[in-house]
Amino acid sequence: MPSELGLKAVVTDPAHLRAALLGAGGIRRFRGLLRDRRLDRDGAPLSREQVLRVRRWIPEQGAERAEIAWKGPAGVSPDGMKQREESELEVEDGAAAERLFEALGYREAQAIDRYVEVYHLGRTVVRLEWYPRMDVLVEIGGDVAGIEEVIRTLRLPREQCLPEALPSFALRFEKRTGRPAILAEAELAGEPPTWSDA
């Protein structure tokens, strides 16, 4: 089963990073909303640190697409990358996929909403992520050599590119700001999301 490798980092100046990506020859493949719904049934997948997810890609222009994915427990590769097994497939209708899993007894365990820009730089995928209320992140995925090359090209501080999961970044945001991180748009209660001025 294929494994994904990646690193995440906090982005203090998204406009500067966007310009650096484009200046390095990055090609933007997507701009819009990314809505993840993580599903669980009686605590089964989550208790084994696994993820069953329906992901909806909602572009600013064009047709929506969706994916169903299973992800195994996350670890760290010998090269210091976040690593986990994954299997995913594309579907035409994410809402219909959610209804199917609901009929099978699965329930939404977590909602994660973000506004993203996805760039390809060679074989490496770079994704800028704005959450409802949290730091802007960049996720870099691909093979080890490609990830390291992108970090050098974009002049990102290597020590700040971490093999950590989203909850770790949310916790650091909360400790630094004293405000709870919000990952689901529905929890904003009228507050504008960070991507409103992306």
Image (spheres, rainbow, N blue to C red):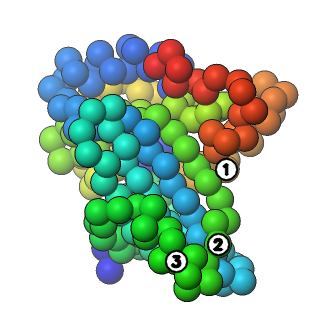
Q: Residue at x 18, y 32 (%)?
A: 27
- Viewer-proximal residue, 27 or 55? 55
- Label 1 Cα neighbours within 10 Å, binned few <14 / some 14-19 / many ≥20: few
Between 122 and 107, the residue placed more toward the observer is 107
**SS class of the residue under badge 2?**
strand
Sequence order check, earlier mark of 3 and 1: 3
- Give the residue at mark 1: 167
- The x, y position of residue 36, in whole percent, is 51, 55
C-alpha separation, residue under disc 2 versus residue under disc 1: 21 Å
Q: Which residue in the protein does label 2 denote?
A: 107
Mark carried by residue 134: none
Regarding residue 37, the answer to whether it shows in the image is: yes
Q: Amino acid at mark 2?
A: Arg
Q: Given this view, does label 3 or label 1 mark the residue nearer the observer?
A: 3
Classify mark 3: residues with Cα within 10 Å, few (<14), some (14-19) or many (20+). Answer: some
Residue, disc 3: 101
Whether residue 119 can be seen here: no
Amino acid at the residue labelled 1: Pro
Is disc 1 placed on a helix, strand or loop? helix
At label 3, which amino acid type do we have?
Phe
